[in-house]
Each structure stands twice: as C-alpha cells, then as structure tokens.
Image: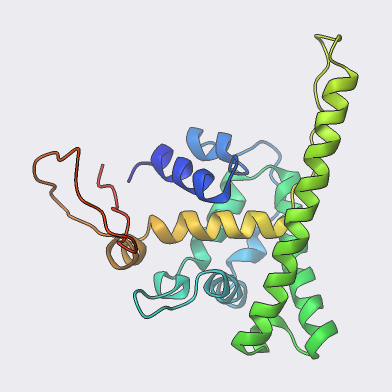
Amino acid sequence: MDRRTAISRVALIMGGAVIGAEFLLSGCRPNGASNVDDLFTTENTALLNEIADTILPDTAASPGAKAANIGPFLAVMVRDCYTPADQKTFIEGIGKINDAGKSKYGNNFADLNAQQRTDIFIALDKEQQEYYKQLYKKIDADMLKHKDDPAYEEPDQPNHYFRMMKELTMLGYFTSEVGATKALRYIETPGHYDGCMSYKKGDKAWAVDD
C-alpha cells in the first residue's frame, strides 16, 4: 500500500483530514522539531504499544496492534512527520494518559487491566470528539465573521493528542504485515481486475499491494 492510499483510508475511517498529512505525504521532517528522542526508549515504545493495542486490541478474527509492534512506528512518525507543536501535544498526552490512570485507578496506564484501559479511552474519545465539535463551530463562526476579508487566514489550532494516537495507530496497523495479512484480505500478486466482485456483510476489506 502506498503512503497516499494509506493516509486516505485512515482519513476516511476517522472522518476527516489526518493530522500531519502534509509531512506524511512529502516525507520531510518539519523544521525546528523538538526533542522527541525519549519516545524511542524501550519503556516508551512498549507503552506506545500498549496504548495502540488498547485502541486496536486482539479479536477472534485478527491480532491487535501490539502484535504488529507499532510502538516504534508511532515514535518515528511523531518525530519525523509532526510539527513541533503537535510533537509537544503528543508527548504531553502520554503523561495525561498516565495521570488519568493514577487519578482513577491509582496506577500508570501500563499497569492497568484491559477494562480499566478501555474505560479511560472511552472517556478520552468522547473528550476529543467534543473538542473537535466545538473547534469546528469556532472555525465556522470565524470564517463567517471574516467572509468579506480575502486575506483572512484561520490561525492554527491545537490538535487533540488522543485523535493523533488513534490516527497513527490505524495507519501503522493497517500498513503493517500483520494488519494487511490478518485483519485485511491480501493477495501478494493480484489476478485479473474484477469491478463487480460480490461482497457479504462482515467480509474483510482488501489490502492494497502497490
């Protein structure tokens, strides 16, 4: 699967643009990137695996994100494809997840059981949805207010860290060998093109080899 297709698929699933997509497509590292080397420690890549695996856990049909070992992938993408502001937000978000675990259950996220982790993420997902709902309302109001000013540009708005984590998890998983061959249907060397192939509800989507 090529980079553009992967980003388009994640954007479709998430219902909007992928954060950092301009850098993902260009393959360029943003200027002035903050120090994110701490993400690459064994402890932190393991934590990123646990976060990703809570977002995409094992199911009866396919293994979860940790099986694809996408913790290092998340670290690379944050370092190389996010702006300094988004890098800072992402790193602070990891701390907020740990704080939520301590506040609600008295433990760091990595020490929580599966149900406790899921409960925290359900709350965070509702939080990020409400955040973007209000943000888009504000953007629409500002654009309407300045509709007669052709030079007006909407100022950059901070992203929500949990949205970033979900996007990168899905991008990393569905472009990994595990995700492409276990969660999706994959043919290494496709045969003839069939533009009207039958589909049954519940069938896996196809991975793309290009």
Question: Closer to the camera, 10 or 172?
Answer: 10
The answer, for residue 157, to whether it is visible in the render is no
Q: Quadrant of residue 36?
A: bottom right
Q: Nearer the viewer, residue 96 or 60?
A: 60
Q: Residue at x 66, y 55 (%)?
A: 163
Identified at 78% across, 39% down, the residue is 136
Q: In the drawing, does residue 47 fall left or right of residue 4?
A: right
Res 23 quadrant in image: top right
Q: Position of residue 89 (x, y in %)?
A: 76, 54
Q: Residue at 28% across / 47% down in the picture? A: 208
Residue 134 is left or right of residue 50, and the answer is: right
Q: Position of residue 35 (x, y in %)?
A: 70, 54
Quarter-of-image position of residue 145: top right
Q: Is residue 108 visible?
A: yes
Q: Is residue 11 left or right of residue 1?
A: right
Depth order, front residue of 93/34: 93
Viewer-proximal residue, 94 or 133? 133
Q: Decide: is 139 above or below 203.
A: above
- Quadrant the C terminus occupies: top left
Q: Residue 40 location in percent, x, y?
A: 58, 66
Horizontal side of 176 relative to 82 (left or right) equals: left
Q: How is the image coloured?
A: rainbow
